[in-house]
Amino acid sequence: MIKIQVDQLLAEHGRTFYWLAKETGISHTTLWRLKKGKALGINFETLEKLCATLKCKPGDVLALGSTKNGAKKDAKKMLPGQRARKKQR
């Protein structure tokens, strides 16, 4: 699972979440979803704005987290019979 390290970068720069939203023009909702791991992806334009504002590289924003917990969470969301089913087209 890929994580967005917004909080860590803001702490390093001594800035707030509100400041980041204002400086980048990225909505508070989008930043919140990235921060909480609720986003399904990140737009390159958004990543570029974050990097330009925080003076960092994309690798500083993105981190590879453990996939064990993410896989377990996804498995819990499925009903017991759903794991064996394949999509039919």
Image (tube, helix red, strand yellow):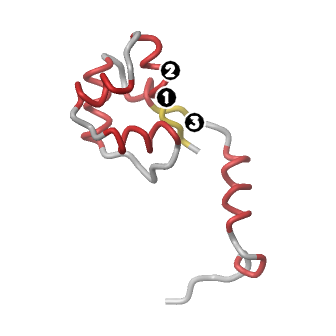
Which of the two marks, 2 or 3, is nearer to us in this view?
2
Q: Are marks 2 and 3 in contact (CB under 8 Å)?
A: no
**Which image quarter holds the N terminus?**
top right
Rendered location of residue 20, percent (x, y): 31, 25
Residue 85 at x, y percent in the picture: 68, 83
Q: Tell me the residue that label 2 is attached to.
A: 8
Pointer 3 residue: 64
Residue pushed farthest right? Answer: 80
Picture layout, residue 43 above or below residue 6: below
Mark 2 residue element = helix
Q: Which mark is residue 5?
A: 1
In contact (CB < 8 Å): disc 2 and disc 1: yes
User: What is the secondary structure assignment of the residue under circle 3?
Assistant: strand
Left or right position of 42 against 79: left
The image quarter containing residue 29 is top left
Q: Position of residue 5 (x, y in %)?
A: 49, 28
Q: State the image coordinates of residue 18 (x, y, percent, origin top left).
A: 33, 26
Q: Is residue 26 above or below residue 23?
A: below
Whole-number angstrom distance, CA of label 3 to CA of label 1: 10 Å
For marks 3 and 1, the one nearer the N-term is 1
Q: Amino acid at mark 1?
A: Gln
Tell me the amino acid under the disc marked 3: Leu
- The residue depicted at 24 percent of the width and 40 percent of the height is 45
